[in-house]
Amino acid sequence: MSLFITSLNSGSNGNCYYVGNEHEAVLVDAGISCRETEKRMLRLGLSIQKVKAIFISHEHTDHISGVPVLAKKYNIPVYITPGTLKHLRINPEEYQIVHFIAHNPVTIGGLTIMAFPKFHDAIEPHSFIISCKDITVGVFTDIGVACEHLITHFSKCHAAFLEANYDDEMLDNGGYPYHLKRRIRGGHGHLSNKQALELFVNHKPEFMSHLLLAHLSKNNNSPELVYELFSNNANGSEIIVASRYEETPVYHIGQIDVIIGKAKQLAFNL
């Protein structure tokens, strides 16, 4: 069994990540319009009829703005915490609302989705891992610090969406006011390139085939800078920088990656 992943959009202007197998899929966040979601999935050859759930990480507009129309039009269940739901401007009676609980796996067809808490300036923020049999993909964005939960789950992923929001020097020298700079790097804001790279270098499993760098700041980062930084430390992983303007290609996270990873681990143990 394989997983197929793409970033439909990634950044402060909207976030939406697709993870699915041959039969069903989920979206993590829906921060772009229903129309853009439809257009981008169509260009990629993905069927929106396969989307069986939308999982919401937190209540910020760039993660929920597309939920009301998309969920209602296609009758897609929305998995969300009670605290986050209060900030989603919908009538819950008109939608399929499901409350998830951290660390409790949710099964949707052949997919298993598990949420865990993260540090971010939101009510009940969560990251997610999505698994299909032996393959695991993580969605890790809007994170203030790389906590033990993140380290543990990142080290088990065959592919991951990982935030690399800002370059320290660009943030220091940029035009943001002091209070905003402090919020971004204050432990409940965003991961810097340096923090994300440390996580990647120190905790990347041998079998991680793809890393999609996500939620780059428009003003305090550079896709070229991030790509070069991570490519120089990739150690066999394919590095992709997710765009704030368009979808990425669909990446196939396949069984061959699992087999190679197990073989490497066996050789190491021997």
Image: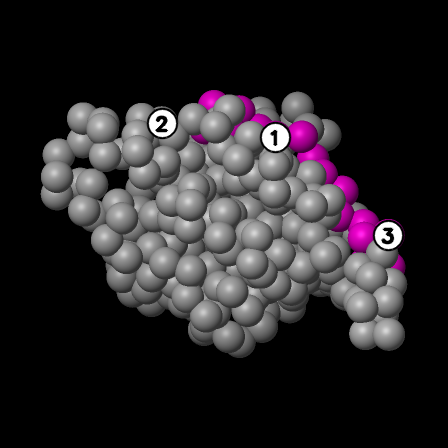
* The magenta stretch spans residue 165: no
Q: Is residue 172 visible?
A: yes
| Residue denoted by label 1 | 248
Percent coordinates x, y for residue 235 in the rendering: 69, 46
Q: Nearer the viewer, residue 126 or 236?
A: 236
Give the quadrant of residue 216: top left
| Residue denoted by label 2 | 218
Labels 1 and 2 touching (C-beta < 8 A):
no
Q: Amino acid at mark 2?
A: Lys
Q: Is residue 138 visible?
A: no
The quadrant of the picture occupied by the C terminus is bottom right
- Drawn side of residue 252 relative to residue 224, left or right: right
Please tell me the numbered disc located at residue 256. Answer: 3
Q: Residues within 10 Å of mark 2 (few under 14, many from 20)?
A: some
Q: Nearer the viewer, residue 219 or 41?
A: 219
Callout 3: SS? helix
Q: Earlier in the sequence, mark 1 or mark 3?
A: 1
Percent coordinates x, y for residue 80 in the rendering: 42, 61
Q: CA distance from mark 1 to mark 3?
A: 22 Å
Percent coordinates x, y for residue 180 in the rendering: 17, 41
Give the quadrant of residue 259: bottom right
Q: Amino acid at mark 1?
A: Thr
Callout 2: SS? loop
Q: Nearer the viewer, mark 1 or mark 3?
A: 3
Identify the residue at horizontal 30%, vertical 33% (top origin).
169
Q: Amino acid at mark 3?
A: Ile
Above-or-below relation of 116 to 176:
below
Q: Earlier in the sequence, mark 3 or mark 2?
A: 2
The quadrant of the picture occupied by the N terminus is bottom right
Q: Which residues are magenta?
A: 243-259
